[in-house]
Every structure is written in C-alpha cells, then in structure tokens.
Amino acid sequence: MFERFSHGYYLGEMYVQPDGSDGAAAIKRADHEHVNEQLYGDEEGITRLDNPLVMKVGTKHFSVVGDEDVPSGTLALPEDAVPEDLEFRLPGRSEVFLANAERARDLMQFTGWEGNTGDPAEYA
C-alpha cells in the first residue's frame, strides 16, 4: 500500500473522500492495524495499534484512526478539514503521504498528544 518516499514519509495512493461526520480522519480498522504492524512495529513485534497514524493529503496533515465503516483503501476526511487544493478533486484517488514513526512522533507532539512514552513505535 505504501512505499518509502523520503527520510520522513512513505507514499501511497488511496481513494480520498469527504465524510459528513465531525470526527477524525479515518481508514478501515484492518488497514490501520496492518499499516501499524508493517511500518511501526519494532524488532520484537510490539506495536500499539490504537495510536493514530499521521497522513498528509494535499497541504494538510491528519491524525488518522481506524474505523470499521470506512471502505478498505479509502481515507475519509471530515468535510470541514478537506484542503482547498483538493476540494474539487474529491472524491477520487490521491497521493497520500504516511509519516514514518519518527516524523509521526514529532508531528503528534505539536498537537499536544499525551499518549507517548518516548518510544517511536507508540506514535503509529
């Protein structure tokens, strides 16, 4: 689903659609857990699957959670959070950047997220 793009990001393509809810950005729960395991698991196989992923679409970063109601391969964004540069292209397939564990940790700290212990795997 995602391939290494740069020092801080993986690149993938997902179907991106606005979601009428006021909730967080979301992908299918099984996809969320799979990405956590594949990209953020440590050498002992330990991964926190409840932590949000950090994805960048257009000009914005999103904290992404797992949700059973989202179709596989789809990123659902709250309508009021859709970047202006994507408004007229949605719904549709778009490039999506996924922050690696180190970059995700840095971005989550800016949001004041308190669920950390300093272990990069916990920011997945």
Image: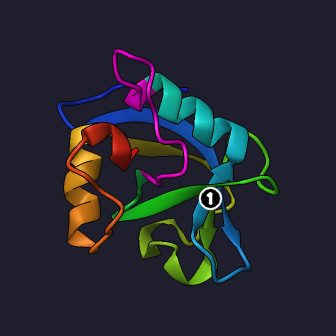
Most foreground residue, 32 or 119: 119
Residue 100 can be seen, yes or no:
no
Bounds of the magenta span?
A: 39-53
* Residue 21 appears left or right of 123: right
Determine if the magenta segment contains residue 31.
Answer: no
| Residue type, numbered disc 1 | Ala
Most foreground residue, 52 or 46: 46
Residue 63 can be seen, yes or no:
yes
- The C terminus lies in which quarter of the figure? top left
* Residue 68 appears left or right of 74: right
Question: In the figure, residue 119 lies in which quadrant?
Answer: top left
Placement of 71 over or under 121, stated as above or below: below
Determine if the magenta segment contains residue 44.
Answer: yes
Placement of 68 over or under 35, stated as above or below: below
**Which secondary structure dominates the residues rendered in magenta?**
loop
Q: How many marks?
A: 1
Query: What percent of the width, then of the height, locates residue 99?
Result: 33, 43
Label 1 residue SS: strand
* Residue 98 appears left or right of 109: right
Q: Residue at x 27, y 74 (%)?
A: 112
The crowding category of the residue bearing disc 1, from other C-alpha atoms within 10 Å (few below 14, some 14 to 19, many at least 20), is many
Query: What percent of the width, then of the height, locates residue 75?
Result: 62, 53
Q: Which residue is drawn at 24% across and 59% down?
A: 107
The residue that disc 1 covers is 26
Q: Residue at x 20, y 48 (%)?
A: 118
Placement of 90 over or under 29, stated as above or below: below
